[in-house]
Image (cartoon, grey):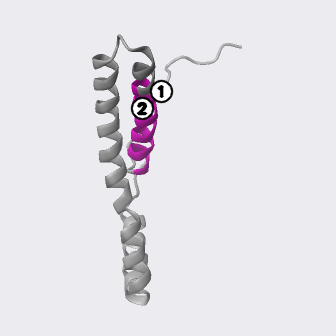
Amino acid sequence: MGLDDKEQKILADIERQFYEEDPELARAVRKIERPARVGLRLSLLGVVAGLVIVIAYVSTTWIAVLGFALLVASATALVNALRVRGWSVPVKESDDEPVD
């Protein structure tokens, strides 16, 4: 659900006041978002590396298990990083009405 024009204007005014009143805090808040980009890249790299390890060492069970663990952990971190960025899976609304 998006914001209407009035709500967007109010939010923009609050943001402008925030930057004017405390520029140091505003800079600190901007820096908080940077690790999300790094987390996204590292998670994606971990997924790819885990998949490569599983495929390359399928005959060596313990190395393949470690690669699978890396793959699962990285995929979990990737999903969390995407959620932080505001991405979500669209949920289809059911057309069925509850049966009494």
The numbered disc on residue 93 is 1
Query: Total number of numbered labels?
Result: 2
Q: Secondary structure at mark 1?
A: loop
Magenta-colored stretch includes residue 75: yes
Of the numbered discs 2 and 1, the one sitting upstream in the chain is 2
Q: Please tell me which residue is depicted at 44% across the width and 81% down the height of the picture.
A: 25
Q: Please tell me which residue is depicted at 40% across the width and 48% down the height of the picture.
A: 86
Q: Which residues are magenta?
A: 67-84
Q: Label 2 crowding class (10 Å Cα cut-off): few <14, some 14-19, many 20+? A: many
The numbered disc on residue 23 is none
Q: Is residue 48 left or right of residue 20?
A: left
**Amino acid on which the number 2 mark rests in the picture:** Leu
Closer to us: 55 or 18 = 55
Q: Quadrant of residue 89?
A: top left
Q: With respect to residue 51, does 89 lie above or below?
A: below
Which quarter shows the C terminus? top right
Q: With respect to residue 75, does 55 lie above or below?
A: above
Residue receiving disc 2 = 70
Q: Please tell me which residue is depicted at 44% across the width and 26% down the height of the picture.
A: 66
Q: Is residue 13 visible?
A: no
Q: With respect to residue 56, does 40 lie above or below?
A: below
**Amino acid on which the number 1 mark rests in the picture:** Glu
Q: Secondary structure at mark 2?
A: helix
